[in-house]
């Protein structure tokens, strides 16, 4: 059978532990509070961090170019 939708990729979360300095922890807590005030939804900083990182990486053109080259070079080396 053929479907228009391709098979979904692995979406199993990968747990990572992260240590940050106190100033960054305070900034993340402030961000979570401003998020609550803006959207009326309370989220812990650790719940917002993945979305923040995804947004940052999605907007980093240099990273996207370098990542594409990295994977292209890896495939050529096989």
Image (cartoon, grey):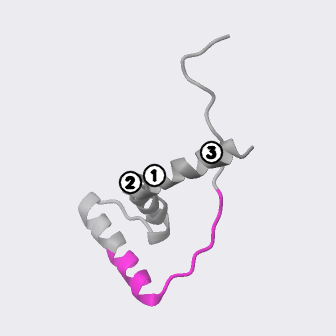
Q: Is residue 37 left or right of residue 51?
A: left
- Secondary structure at badge 2 equals helix
Magenta stretch in the rendered image:
14-30
Of 20 and 76, nearer the camera is 76
Q: Residue 42: percent from the left, percent from the top? A: 38, 64
Taking the magenta stretch, the answer to whether it contains residue 29 is yes
Of 58 and 2, nearer the camera is 58
Of 66 and 32, nearer the camera is 66
Taking the magenta stretch, the answer to whether it contains residue 39 is no
Disc on the earlier residue, 2 or 3: 3
Residues tagged 1 and 2 counted as in contact (Cβ below 8 A): yes
Dot 3, crowdedness within 10 Å: few (<14), some or many (≥20)?
Answer: few
Q: Please tell me whether mark 3 or mark 1 is closer to you in this view.
A: 1
Q: Is residue 33 left or right of residue 78?
A: left
Q: Residue at x 56, y 81 (%)?
A: 19
Q: Residue at x 52, y 47 (%)?
A: 68
Give the vertical position of 49 relative to 8 (above or below). below
């Amino acid at each position: 059978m053929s479907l228009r939708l391709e098979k979904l990729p692995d979406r199993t979360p990968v747990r990572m532990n992260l240590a940050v300095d106190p100033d960054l922890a305070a900034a993340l807590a402030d961000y979570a509070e401003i998020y609550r005030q803006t959207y009326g939804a309370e989220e812990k900083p650790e719940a917002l961090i993945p979305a923040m990182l995804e947004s940052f990486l999605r907007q980093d053109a240099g990273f996207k170019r370098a990542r594409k080259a990295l994977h292209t070079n890896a495939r050529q080396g096989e």
